Image (cartoon, helix red, strand yellow):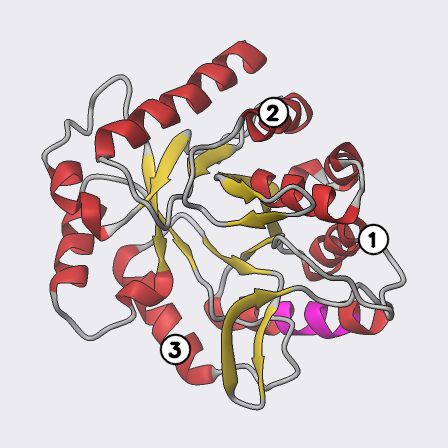
């Protein structure tokens, strides 16, 4: 199985590493193939973030990853946010735009967290309609990411993986499959992560996320402040076997190490990819 849209192996673009990135040989045989930006960090009228972003965009492919679309909210879509998102996309021409399958607030109040949805027929209809509106406005397909979760809803009448698969097919959108989030939720809710992977429509899986977490004995919290652990690497191997060469990136949002250490971790992902796919 081949996927021509696979970008290879990337990292999240973080301010700590701007200068390291600009001093790096973008033609090196091993290194970073692309970067993922947090969209909201650059939805500003000017300043250093955009200065660095423009310079990095000249050298590397970029994708945009948002945290504020709130596609599952019952609030109306924020059209000011949508306009700023579209303007940023027109500026840097990302390979794709993604956000999370979640809601982030209600009644205009932002919870500053990615809250899971009830996986019900009504919620599915609601999300599909909103995804279609967003894609029509942006003029492109979007990717939606599975979030880690620590609670469930009594109103859920389907599994998360069946909900995502049906949403992607009905809305004609794509999937950002967060391998760490699957592992975290599987542990917290006692399901088999293989069931999750097997339910995904392979032709719609465009990107993988890898990250670390904090294991607290009875539960796991998705923190993005640790190296990718062995169990997540193993699940990544399984995902590669099922979906083939999918663009893969490592997220690190706290306790950020030197850039060289992230490159070494990214090289682990590349090596696993070569082992599985060769």
Return the residue nearer the eye: 22 or 85. 22
Q: Helix or strand or loop: what does disc 3 sit on?
A: helix
Q: Which residue is mark 2?
A: 240
Give the image location of residue 61, x and y in percent: 31, 42
Q: CA distance from mark 1 to mark 2?
A: 22 Å
* Residue 107 location, quadrant: bottom right
Camera-near label (3 vs 1) is 1
Q: Helix or strand or loop: what does disc 2 sit on?
A: helix
Camera-near label (3 vs 2) is 2
User: Are the residues flagged by discs 3 and 1 in contact, CB closer than 8 Å?
Assistant: no
Q: Which residues are magenta?
A: 125-132
Q: Which residue is mark 1?
A: 159
Give the image location of residue 182, x and y in percent: 66, 43
Return the residue nearer the eye: 109 or 47. 109
For the stretch drawn in magenta, the main secondary structure is: helix
Q: Which residue is mark 3?
A: 83
* Residue 233 location, quadrant: top right
Quick check: is 37 in the magenta stretch? no
Q: Residues within 10 Å of mark 3 (few under 14, many from 20)?
A: some
Q: Residues within 10 Å of mark 2 (few under 14, many from 20)?
A: some
């Amino acid at each position: 199985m081949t996927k021509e849209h696979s970008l290879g192996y990337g990292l999240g673009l973080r301010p700590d590493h701007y200068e390291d990135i600009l001093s790096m040989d973008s033609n090196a045989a091993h290194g970073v193939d692309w970067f993922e930006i947090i969209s909201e960090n650059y939805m500003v009228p000017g300043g250093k973030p955009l200065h660095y972003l423009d310079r990095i965009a000249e050298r590397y492919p970029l994708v945009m990853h948002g945290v504020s679309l709130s596609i599952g909210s019952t609030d109306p879509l924020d059209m000011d946010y949508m306009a700023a998102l579209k303007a940023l996309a027109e500026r840097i021409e990302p390979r794709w735009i993604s956000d999370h399958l979640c809601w982030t607030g209600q009644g205009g109040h932002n919870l500053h967290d990615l809250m899971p949805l009830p996986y019900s027929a009504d919620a599915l209809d609601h999300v599909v309609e909103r995804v279609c509106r967003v894609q029509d406005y942006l003029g492109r397909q979007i990717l939606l990411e599975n979030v880690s979760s620590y609670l469930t809803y009594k109103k859920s009448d389907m599994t998360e993986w069946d909900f995502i698969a049906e949403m992607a097919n009905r809305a004609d959108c794509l999937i950002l499959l967060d391998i760490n989030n699957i592992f975290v939720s599987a542990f917290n809710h006692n399901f088999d992560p293989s069931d999750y992977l097997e339910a995904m429509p392979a032709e719609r899986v465009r990107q993988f996320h890898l990250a670390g977490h904090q294991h607290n004995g009875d539960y796991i919290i998705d923190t993005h402040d640790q190296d990718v652990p062995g169990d997540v690497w193993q699940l990544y191997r399984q995902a590669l076997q099922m979906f083939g060469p999918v663009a893969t990136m490592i997220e690190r949002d706290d306790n950020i190490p030197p850039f060289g250490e992230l490159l070494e971790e990214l090289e682990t992902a590349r090596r696993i990819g070569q082992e599985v796919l060769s």
